[in-house]
Each structure stands twice: as structure tokens, then as C-alpha cells.
Image (cartoon, coloured by chain):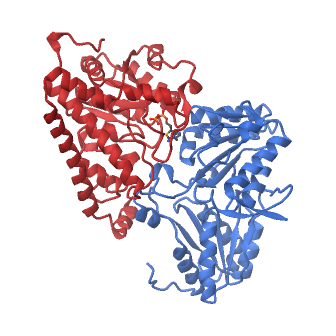
Chain colours: A blue, B red
Amino acid sequence: MARELMYRDALREAIDEEMERDSSVFIIGEGIAERGGSYKVTEGLLDKYGPKRVRDTPIAEAGMIGVGVGAAIAGARPIVEILYVDFAMLGMDMLVNQAAKFRLMTGGDGRVPFVMRTQGGTGGGVAAQHSQSLEALFYHIPGLQVVMPSVPADAKGLLKYALRQQDPVMFLEHKHLYMTKGMVPDGEHIIEFGKGDIKRPGKDVTIIAWSNMIPRALEAAAKLAEEGIDAEVLDPRTLVPLDKAMILTSVAKTNRVVIAQEAVRRGGVASDIASIIQAEAFYDLDAPIEIVAGLNIPVPFNLELEKASVPQVDDIVVAARRTLHAKPFALAAE
Amino acid sequence: MSAQSSNANAPSRELLEKLFRTAYKIRVFETEGIKLYRQGLIRGYFHPYLGQEGIATGVCAALKDGDYIASTHRGHGHCIAWGASINKMVAELLQKDTGYCRGYGGSMHIADIKAGNLGANGIVGAGTPLGVGAALASQVKGSDAVTVTFTTDGASNNGTFMESLNLAAIWNLAFVLVVENNQYAVSTKIEESTREVDLYKRGLAIGVESYQVDGNDSLAVYNMTKDAVEKCRRGEGPILIEAKTYRHMGHHVNDPGKYMPADRLAYYKERDPVDRARAALTEMSGIDQSEIDAIENEIRQEFEAAVEFSKASGEVTIAEFREFAAAY
Ligand SMILES: Cc1ncc(C[n+]2csc(CCOP(=O)(O)OP(=O)(O)O)c2C)c(N)n1
């Protein structure tokens, strides 16, 4: 059985159930207690768990992330909510030099069961400092796991799993997804990291996407279907660890790949996935791998320019078509 | 430093009129801007400066050409007090090519580098090191420019506050840190984010001359800033000024601010900085009501004209944007 839930409610359920199950889980963030957070994920938790476990913080991201990491080292299970991923940049030392390194530097004894929840992506003209997709920064750092759920069920299952992990998790939500709805299984629902999901099976071309690019990839697939092109849409769900097996199996079947990310193209995760595919499945490919990504530029305030700065449905459609005509052809849409 | 002026240096009509004009202009910009926002003409974030007009007004009146300011995410007031073009500000909010940042920046990022306005900032606390950096550049270049950073109670808990103010202190920079203590960070009351709510004391802790002023009294803010700026020009900076104030509404246009106690809000509204600037002008300069009306009309018309100008302006084209991106 399953119920329809909003992404934000699914996240809340995950936190609620894990707080109930494990008294060492607590959450800190700006305006998350009485106000329930800017995106209403933590609404009601203060009433249920009290101010010891649901705490507001001052605007002090480096400190918040750092004390979260310290609390994790000392055996609690902190969730640190950072309002926008852009603000996590203030805490990068704690993430990169402390959280990610601790386990190795202690010879494997020290564990950091730390979850940073935050959100990124474009939406509604909130401009350059509130619209970034920064997963590649975390992806690059050994020791950080990177989770990017696209649908409510995944949001819940992955967050519950995150809260049982021994190592730091960057849990990256998307501002455009909070109000989206989807079916979430009843009862205990946990999704292991490193297990991707086939959001739409198909045989002609593999579209790999995550987070808010999943709804766009699915829309693109529907358009492609009208042209008789059967696209398979893969959602790795966790970028670290990455479900390579799912990707390689799909490539062996379709022989064509489009990778769509909202983040800027340069130094992005899509490029790394492409490099993995070419190294491990080169002979399965019938066409060059297509990457559809954000322009290498900060996100502008102007809504039309904002849209132009990140991939839209048609960009994915065009790229998929291109893989089916092994020789790229001039495209009307460009 | 006292806000009271003796007769010898009684404020001139010119100064009083300037303070009132600025405060009123900010008031009109914000109240009318909110309407445009509600009509869907302005998108993204819009953090009104309503209730805090006295601070930007008083501070900027004490600065001169060649000085620098750096602002907060609530930056319209600073921009206006710095003498910005209302046309270009409205155009920016409406995403137009004629805006200060050609529609790339928006409300939280309006800047005018040529005029010494380092800009509003979407990152709470980021303006302080940037301002200290501008003061450092002035020192290196041997200029007598003073930099003011407007910052906030919320930002005072961020590491950037102490780190950069301390640098300004050990290097004696010509830097004034104006802490606008409006007592809230979104809905979090200041008492919940610090044990010591008198924020000027943070400056004292690291050897920075620090004061507190009534932020709703633009004349008091002006006088205090003027002294601070003079000291800075003499090489006796930096100086911290905490200006106490209160927002007249929620954190941004879509926040009704229900968490703000009605009696407290009423207390501050009774001390409305725009009304006080008007009253000071009336009482101390002998100006008559018709002149006040004329000033208000003129400012309203300036805003209306800016809306017309902005509506008629075009946006950056996608093609041009792609060229920009290719070269970025
Ligand atoms: C580094 C950072 N953290 C969080 C935010 C989100 N945020 C924007 S404004 C704000 C509250 C700011 O309060 P305060 O600094 O006191 O300024 P005020 O809004 O009262 O003018 C918060 C938390 C941000 N923009 N930057």
C-alpha cells in the first residue's frame, strides 16, 4: 500500500520516524523549530521532540556544520539543515577538511554519522547566490556521500537510510520539488545508497538524470515516445556511491546515452559519469555520449535568462535525437 | 558622541531636507515596490527596508563622493540613500536591460561599482569582509576614502563579522561597520541568537571604538556617522555603530511577520523614522506644509516615472546572454 505525499512531507516523515526510533537523532538549522523551516520540512517536530532535539541556530553556517560534525564524532546523529546549498560554502572547511577526512585520519576508528540537508537549483528568479547546483563540489571529495532524490518516495527512503549511516551524507534536495507529489510506500521504507532506479524503462536511448532533471527527462521521454523513440530514464538517486551496474546494463541495452544535469557543465558529475561509461562500456556505444547541462555561468535573476541557463525538456529531446542519428545534424532548436 | 546638537551646530535646512527626502524616497520605493511585487511584476526575493529608513539615510548623508558602501540583502534603502537612480533600480527589479545589473542581479544584488556601491548581497555577512577589503584598498592606494558596511544583527553571529572587523582594527582601516539591529533574523528574535543583545559590545571586545544609536532618528545617525567618518579619515578607524531599529513587516514580501508582537511593532511605528525626519524638518527649519507636500509629490512622481521607464525597457536577449556565458 502507498499514499500520495508531497516531497517535503516525505522528508518530514523520514526525520520523524528516525527521531522516534533513535533518540540520538537531532536537527539544527535556521528557523527550523517553531517556524518549521522555510520549506516546511520540519513543521511540527519541535512540538513532538522538544527544543533539545529540534533547535534553531543563529546565522552561523561554519559553526553549525562544525558542531554537527563534532556531535557526530561523539556519537549523536545530527541533521544540519542549511537553507540553501549556496550557504554551505561557509562551512566547507568542516565538510571537506574535517568530516570527510576524519575516518581515514583516525585509521578507520572515527566515524562521522552526519547528515547535511540542504537544497539547490534554480526556480523563480532567486538569482545567482540562491540557485546553484553544487553537487560536483561534494562529489569530488572522497569521504562525502551525495544524495539527490527526485521523488517523494526516494526522498523518504534515502533520508531514513542516511540517518543510519556511519559516514557523512550531503543530502541535496531541490527547491522546485518540495511541493511535488508522489506515491510513498506505507510502513518502513528505506532505500539503500548506491541503488539507482529506472524511472521509465526503454530500449532506444538511456537518459541519466537526477533531482529536478528527472521530471524533465520524463517529459522529454514522453515527447520522444511520440516520435517513436523509446527512452529509458535512469535516476542514480545517489551520486556517491554511484550505481554503475545499473548504468552499464542500460547502456548495453540502448547503446546510446544522454546525461542531463542542472549544474554547470564544466567539471560536473555528468562528465565523470560519461568518463566511466566510455572507460567501461565504450564498445556498447553507437553514438557519442551527450551531456545536457547548465551553461558555465552563474544563474541570472531574469526569468527568461534563468531558464536559458539550465537544461529544459527540449534540450534533452534534441540531445536524445542526436544520439539516434549517430552523425550530429543541424538542429532547429539551437 | 551625542545626538543632541547645540545651537552652534544646529542642523541646516539643507541637511534636514536631504534627510527627509531620502527617508521618504526609500519609503515610497518600498511601499510601491511591494505593490509591483504583488502584481507579479517583480519576481524573486524582495526584502523591504520599511521602518529602517533612518539608518541608511543618516549614514549616507555623512559620506562623500569617492567613499564606498557595502550592503546587506535588504539593500534598497542603502542604494537609494547613496543617490542611486530610481529608474535603474526599478528597472533592475523588473529584470530589464536598463537596470543597474541589466536584470542579471535583481533585488539582492543591486550594485553600482562606479559610484562606490559594492552592492547588496545574498549571503548574510558577506558584505563585511568586502567592505573591509575596500578600506584596505583605499589605504594601500593612499586615498582618504572611508568605507561603510551595513550589516545586520543576524550577520553579527557569522564568522565573517569578527574576522574582518579584527583585520580592520589591527590595520587601522578607514572603515565604519554599521550594524542594523532590527532584532530579527527572519523570525528568530535576537534574544534567541545571542546572550548579549547590545551588539556594539562585540566591537569593544576587540579594541574597536563602538557606539549605539537610535536607528530611527536619522539626524542622530547622521551626527554619529559624521564623527566616525572624520575619525576614520584621520586614521583613527575602524568604528562600529550599532543602530537599533525594527522592521515594519515580515522578513520579505511574502512573510506576514505574525511572530512580531503587536505592542512592540506599535512602539516602533510611533517612532517611525520617516515621520521623525519630516517632523525634524518642519520643526527646525520653518518649512511650511505646502513645501513638504511638494517634496512628497515630486518623489512619488519620480517613482511613477521610473515604473513607466522600466515597463518600456527591454530585456537582455537570450542570444546576448549566450555570448556572455561563452566568455564567462
Ligand atoms: C549565509 C546565509 N545564511 C542564511 C541566509 C538566509 N537568510 C537570508 S536573510 C536571513 C535573516 C537575516 O537576518 P539579519 O541578518 O538580522 O538581517 P535582517 O533580515 O534582519 O535585515 C537569513 C537567515 C543567507 N542569505 N545567507
Q: Position of residue A73 (x, y in %)?
A: 76, 33
Task: Give left or right: position of B243 versus A30.
Answer: left
Residue B301 versus residue B131 in the image, above or below? below
Residue at the extreme front: B289
Q: Position of residue A224 (x, y in %)?
A: 60, 83
Tally of marks: 0
Q: Quadrant of residue B279?
A: top left
Task: Give left or right: position of B243 versus A228.
Answer: left
- Residue drawn at 62 percent across, 59 percent down: A177
Q: Nearer the viewer, residue A296 or B149?
A: B149
Q: Nearer the viewer, residue B58 or A272?
A: B58
- Residue drawn at 56 percent across, 24 percent down: B191
Task: Give left or right: position of B160 versus B280.
Answer: right
Q: Nearer the viewer, residue A301 or B74?
A: B74
Q: Nearer the viewer, residue B317 or B193?
A: B193
Q: Position of residue B316 (x, y in %)?
A: 32, 64
Residue at the extreme bottom: A228
- Residue B140 seen by the camera: no
Q: Position of residue A117 (x, y in %)?
A: 66, 46
- Residue drawn at 58 percent across, 38 percent down: A91
Quadrant location, the C terminus of chain B: bottom left
- Residue B39 seen by the camera: yes
Residue A219 versus residue A149 in the image, above or below? below
Residue A283 versus residue B229 in the image, above or below? below
Quadrant location, the N terminus of chain B: top left
